[in-house]
Image: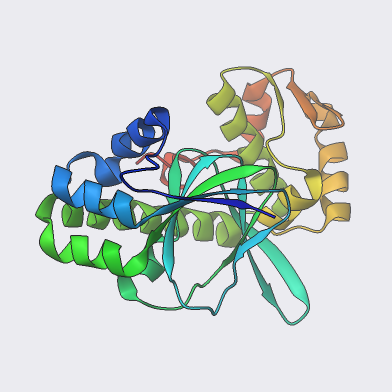
Amino acid sequence: MSSTLKLGAENNMAEPDSDEIRGLKLFAEMEQTQYERLLRASYVQNFPPQIELITEGDNADFLHVVLAGTIDLFSRWNDREVSMATVRPVSTFILAATIRNGPYLMSARTLEKSRVMLIPSEDVRAAFDEDNAFARAIVKELAQCYRVVVKNTKDLKLRTSLERLVNYLLRQKNRTGSFEFDLNMEKRRLASFLGMSPENLSRAFKRLEPYGVKVSGSHISIDDPNDLETLAKPNPLIDDYTT
C-alpha cells in the first residue's frame, strides 16, 4: 500500500522536495501565491515497484511530478505492449493531457520505489488561465516535448534497428561522459523502446562486437566510439534532446 501525505499548513512538503519542484522550469517563474495554491491542493505519495499509476484512456485527473524513483511510460494495443519513455526525478508527466483535459495517451508504472507528487489537473488549468508566466512555461515545455516526439519518430522511421541501438549507446556515452556505463533500463525494456524484439536486440549486440562494443549483463564498454559514429551517423536533429 502507498502512503499519502496531504500538503497543507499542518503537513508541509519537506523543504528539499519543495525547492526541487520550485526549481523546475515549469514552476520557477510562476507567482508565489499561485505556486502555494497548487501545493495546498496537492498530495505526495510513496509507491512500491510495479504499481500502475495511470492507465491510458482514463481522464487526466492529476499532473504527476516524480520526486524519487523511476517511472515507465508505456502503451498497450492488441495484446502488444511498448515502452514509450522513462521519467526520472525531478520531472513531470503527462502535461498535455492535463492541459487539454483529455484522456491519458499512455500508461505509467513505477519501476522502483518512487515518490510522486499529484497536482489536481483542474488546479493546474486554473493557474494556466491566471498566471502568464506559468502559461508561458507550459507552452515551452509542451513545445520541447513535441520536438522530442518528432526526433523519436525520425529515429524509428529513418534508421535500422542496429542504427537505433548504436545511436542510443552513443547518447548514453555522451550522457555519462564515459566509454563504460550501465544501461539505464533492463534489456527487455530497451528492446521495446527501440522498436525491437529482445531476440533482435541480443543479435544486434553481437553484431557490434567487431566494432569494440562489449556487453556484460547491463554493463557496456566501448573501445572506439569513432567506429560506432561511422556506422550510425549520429545527427543532432535526431539525437540531441536538448535542442
Total labels drawn: 0
Write the residue at 15% across / 66% down.
Answer: 129
Q: Position of residue 113 (x, y in %)?
A: 67, 42
Q: Is residue 181 left or right of residue 98?
A: right
Q: What quarter of the picture does the C terminus occupy?
A: top left
Nearer to the camera, 228 or 239: 239
Q: Position of residue 230 (x, y in %)?
A: 62, 32
Q: Does any portion of residue 81 appear in the rendered image?
A: yes
In the depicted structure, whether residue 175 falls above or below residue 235: above
In the depicted structure, whether residue 84 falls above or below residue 174: below
* Quarter assignment of residue 102: bottom left
Q: What quarter of the picture does the N terminus occupy?
A: bottom right
Nearer to the camera, 88 or 84: 88
In the depicted structure, whether residue 169 falls above or below residue 54: above
* Quarter assignment of residue 237: top left
Write the residue at 44% across / 72% down.
Answer: 60
Q: Does any portion of residue 194 appear in the rendered image?
A: no
Q: How is the image coloured?
A: rainbow
Q: Is residue 17 left or right of residue 114?
A: left
Q: Residue furthest front?
A: 10
Q: Position of residue 119 (x, y in %)?
A: 38, 58
Q: Position of residue 159 (x, y in %)?
A: 61, 54
Write the residue at 21% across / 66% down.
Answer: 126
Write the residue at 84% across / 53% down.
Answer: 198
In the depicted structure, whether residue 77 falls above or below residue 172: below
* Quarter assignment of residue 115: top right
Q: Is residue 53 left or right of residue 207?
A: left
